[in-house]
């Protein structure tokens, strides 16, 4: 049994095994319908329990299809329906019940400590569907998409992030270290990665492959891929008008994309004012493929957690 909480904690060789498996699984599904099972029905009889404490569209849909194609079932719980939030039941007791009834637990949460507390008491794998500090399933799928489009290992590519230093960027930084690719981060000075992430970068040998710029034009120079995300994240408790004003010069515009004409644009969605419509709908934008690929990678993440990777 393996957990999937943060890319920092998973060996690079295991992350690569997940991507290899996902590629094979996608290739053999080209003529299948969404709910047609994978050959071998690898997770037949298994139940994935999901709980969402934050809004979700892509994560919810992709995990449903992922476990279904592996011939398992999914049950989605709302936190406001559980004794955990309403009746004061402990995480320990909730985890024991989840372990008795389910075979894996996927949690999208507004609290990193809650993930770790569940992990301590669960006897089944737990998967982080998004937390304040990390979005590992999103970024591993994004690595898959980048390599699929560019047809080369991500270690040979130049990756750029333009935007806020949030949970998605944290996972992209972890991926940069695990897969050894160059990463340029473009953001206003006061929105740079926090002290914890900067210490993580410094502790790793390839720290020189991650560079932070306060000028978006410098950050996109030579880029093969440009990532972005909403400037105002879910439950972001900030002065929104001020933050949007601070990021005014970091918008992904047509002029900015012209500086790297071979680059593709990726966005984990939902989008906001951080990207111009003519960029989002351009030929450089690969956001819809990026979203659909999450099914394939999450299937392989599930198999990894169950010890059933091919």
Image (cartoon, rainbow, N blue to C red):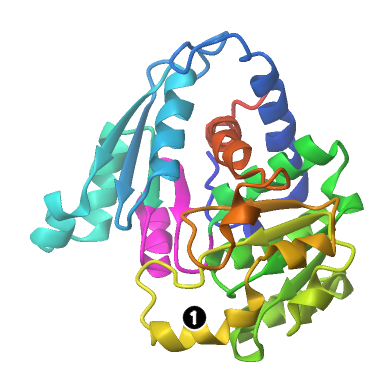
**Does residue 266 appear to the left or right of 215 in the view shown?**
left
Residue 235 drawn in magenta: no
Residue at 46% x, 55% y: name it: 270
Judging from the image, what secondary structure is the residue with disc 1 in?
A: helix
Residue 246 in view in this figure: yes
Residue interval drawn in magenta = 108-134
Eyeballing the image, is 273 above or below 211?
above
- The C terminus: image quadrant: top right
- Looking at the picture, tell me which residue is in the foreground, 226 or 3: 226
Q: Quadrant of residue 261?
A: bottom right
Eyeballing the image, is 213 above or below 81?
below
Residue 194 x/y as whole percent: 60, 83
**Does residue 97 appear to the left or right of 65 in the view shown?**
left
- Looking at the picture, tell me which residue is in the foreground, 209 or 253: 253
Eyeballing the image, is 27 above or below 301?
above
> For mark 1, what is the residue?
244
- Looking at the picture, tell me which residue is in the foreground, 291 or 128: 291
Residue at 36% x, 65% y: name it: 110
Eyeballing the image, is 20 above or below 184?
above
**Does residue 177 appear to the left or right of 29 in the view shown?**
right
Label tally: 1
Within-10-Å neighbours for mark 1: few <14, some 14–19, many 20+: some
Residue 123 in view in this figure: no
């Amino acid at each position: 049994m393996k957990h999937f909480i943060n890319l920092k904690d998973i060996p690079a060789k295991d992350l690569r095994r997940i991507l290899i498996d996902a590629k094979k699984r996608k290739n053999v599904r080209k003529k299948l319908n969404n709910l047609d099972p994978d050959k071998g029905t690898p997770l037949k009889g298994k139940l994935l329990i999901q709980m969402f404490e934050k809004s979700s569209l892509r994560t919810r849909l992709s995990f449903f299809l992922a476990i279904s194609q592996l011939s398992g079932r999914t049950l989605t719980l709302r936190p406001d329906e559980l004794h955990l939030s309403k009746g004061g039941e402990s995480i320990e007791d909730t985890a024991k019940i989840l372990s008795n009834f389910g075979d894996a637990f996927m949690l999208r949460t507004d609290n990193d400590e809650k993930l770790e507390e569940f992990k301590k008491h669960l006897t089944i794998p737990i998967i982080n569907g998004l937390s304040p500090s990390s979005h590992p399933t999103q970024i591993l799928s994004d690595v898959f998409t980048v390599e699929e489009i560019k047809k080369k290992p991500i270690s040979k590519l130049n990756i750029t992030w333009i935007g806020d230093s949030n949970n998605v960027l944290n996972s992209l930084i972890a991926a940069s270290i695990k897969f050894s690719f160059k990463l340029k981060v473009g953001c206003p000075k006061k929105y740079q990665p926090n002290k914890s992430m900067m210490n993580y970068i410094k502790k790793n040998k390839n720290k020189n492959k991650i560079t932070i710029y306060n000028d978006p034009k410098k950050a996109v120079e030579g880029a093969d891929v440009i990532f972005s995300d909403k400037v105002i994240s879910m439950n972001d408790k900030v002065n929104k008008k001020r933050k949007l004003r601070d990021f005014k010069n970091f918008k992904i515009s047509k002029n900015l994309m012209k500086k790297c004409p071979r680059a593709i644009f990726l966005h984990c969605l939902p989008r906001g004012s951080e990207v111009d419509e003519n960029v989002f709908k351009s030929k450089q934008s690969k956001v819809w493929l990026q979203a659909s690929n999450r099914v394939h990678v999450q299937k392989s993440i599930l198999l990894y957690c169950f010890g059933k990777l091919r």
